[in-house]
Image (spheres, rainbow, N blue to C red):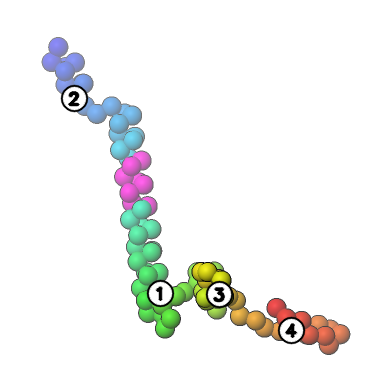
Amino acid sequence: MRERYLSQLEPSEALVTKTTRLKEKLAKLAEEMRRLDLIETQMLAAPDQQISLTDPDSRSMATSGRGSSVVLPVGSISNSAGRWACL
């Protein structure tokens, strides 16, 4: 009887597995929070307090309508025929 009682007190394998998965998720979330903290530090250090994670030259700018848009820099190239094209 005592052994049965003690065996019931031990955590089940399903509970151990669930606990392990939750600990892994928490570790991933903590890592993501550290990554986001680094990005925030970079953003606050930027002159206009904005950064782009995909294109370092793009910026968010106000538009004539409501809100803002992401604006990319404009460049130009010429093809082999000497014609100019805007990028």
Q: Nearer the viewer, residue 58 or 53?
A: 58
Which residue range is magenta in the image?
21-28
Which residue was labeled with disc 4? 77
Q: Check residue 72 in the rendering and tell me which mark sits there, or answer none.
A: none
Label 1 Cα crowd, 10 Å radius (few <14 / some 14-19 / many 20+): some
Disc ID at residue 63: 3
* Residue occupying image coordinates x 33% and y 49%: 26
CA–CA distance in space, label 2 to label 4:
74 Å
Dot 1 or dot 4, earlier in sequence: 1
| Magenta-colored stretch includes residue 24 | yes
Mark closer to the chain start, 2 or 3: 2
Q: CA distance from mark 1 to mark 3?
A: 22 Å
Which sits earlier in the primary sequence, circle 2 or circle 1?
2
Q: Marks 2/1: CA distance? A: 51 Å
Asked if labels 4 and 3 touch by Cβ distance under 8 angstroms, the answer is no
Q: Nearer the viewer, residue 19 or 49?
A: 49
Secondary structure at badge 4 equals strand
Q: Which residue is mark 2?
A: 9
Element class at badge 1? helix
Residue 4 in which image quadrant: top left
Q: CA distance from mark 3 to mark 4?
A: 27 Å
Residue farthest to the front, as pictured? 65
How crowded pointer 4 is (Cα within 10 Å; few <14, some 14-19, many 20+) is rated as few
